[in-house]
Image (tube, grey):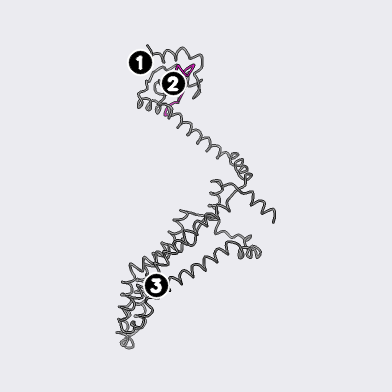
Amino acid sequence: MAEDQTDDSQKTEDPTPKKLEESRKRGQIALSREVNNWVMLCTGTIFIVAFSGPMMSQLADMMRVYIEFSHALPGMPGGLSVVLGEGVKKVFSIILLPLMLFMFAAFAAPFLQIGPLFAPEVIKPDWSKISIKKGFGRLFSMRSVVELIKGVVKICIVGLIAIIIISPYYSGFEHFIDIPITAVMEELRFLVIQMMVGVLIVLMVVAMMDLLYQRFEYNKKMRMSRQEIKDEYKQSEGDPHVKAKLRQLRSEKARQRMMQAVPSADVVITNPTHYSIALKYNPEEMPAPKVVAMGIDETALRIRELAKEHDIILYENKPLARALYDVAEIDEMIPMEHFKAVAEIISYVFKLKGRLN
């Protein structure tokens, strides 16, 4: 027990993307049920506000027709089954839309929180979870206490809102006896809408607080010790696929930095199609010209395009371009054996630019 507490106390680092991804694959995510419930309640409220009036009218009309023709049922062959069948169809057609809306809300609520997720491991049987000891541990855990408190708070909120909204109408309920049933249903509908909107507003705050709490608990649960991060790094570095991916990322970043340096060049020596070497020279700061970018084929073409965009002179010298590509390094001075040839080109370029008399 003390060992577990020590391990938990050592987990002070934020989880790595790799651990979060593996956790997501296992279906372990920060999901708030209160947000799901709020979305469902919001869907129900919107539906009642928008469609409950017409639905109640349809149901009232249907009941009125059945009551009016009920005396004729005994004389009709199979009359009761026909009426019941038609009634079921009518009721189904009325409730089909709300059923579809609630199904959509049931899928949309988790999607809005965590995005698309497919975790086959969640549905696999895990017999290790069947443990009386662990069951009691979960029953009396802090999470269970929080869930209990949330349940009590929600019941109190709903009850309080119901009392606040119904109280002004309590003395007037007696007049329901003297008005048509349709008017009674309309007033009750308005009362229910008021209650649902009130509950919706308050539970929105509860849902937001629960969402923040669930994410806090999830991040706390996913924390790692420094040793775990080191072990994960070593494991990842040993994976050839990860190494290849890292090399690719480093190569792409290096290429981006190189392309960003092309506009600072003074001249680009070309092959002219297969090789491009971008050189920069500042006599006051550099003992010799420096290679800021170089490449072949598509990279060479992109260097030439950038040079044209920034009015950098393109100088064709096939042997020198190939030689520099073979021996020069990016962000390094050119090799000494090429000083003379490059100096002539730099001198020519500076004269064109008026930087050398």
Q: Which residue is mark 2?
A: 280
Above or below for 276 versus 217: above
> Left of 267 or right of it: where is 9?
right
Q: Residue furthest right?
A: 2
Q: Examine the structure image and report whether residue 116 is included in the region drawn in magenta.
A: no
Q: Amino acid at mark 3?
A: Ile
How far is disc 1 from disc 2 in space, using C-alphas? 16 Å
- Residue 296 disc label: none
* 142 shown above or below 234: below
As helix, strand or loop, the secondary structure at mark 2 comes to strand
Residue drawn at the location 55% of the way across and 58% of the way down: 122
Residue 232 image offset from top left, x and y in percent? 60, 43
Secondary element at tag 3? helix
Start and end of the magenta stretch?
Answer: 278-298
| C-alpha distance separating marks 3 and 2 | 78 Å
Q: Amino acid at mark 1?
A: Gly
Asked if 48 appears above or below 225 in the picture, the reply is below
Along the line of sight, the residue nearer the viewer: 90 or 262: 262
In the rendered image, which residue does mark 1 sit on? Answer: 354
User: Relative to residue 303, is residue 140 drawn left or right?
Assistant: right
The span from disc 1 to disc 3 (Cα, nearest Å) is 86 Å
User: Which circle, 1 or 2, is nearer the viewer?
Assistant: 1
Tell me where residue 327 appears, x and y as whole percent: 51, 20
Q: Identify the residue at image location x=46%, y=31%.
A: 257
| First in sequence: mark 1 vs mark 3 | 3
Specify whether 257 is left or right of 57: right
Residue sitting at 33 percent across and 67 percent down? 50
The percent coordinates of residue 234 (x first, y second) are 61, 40
> In which quarter of the view is residue 160 placed?
bottom left
Kindly identify which residue carries mark 3.
Answer: 165
Foreground disc of the pair 1, 3: 3
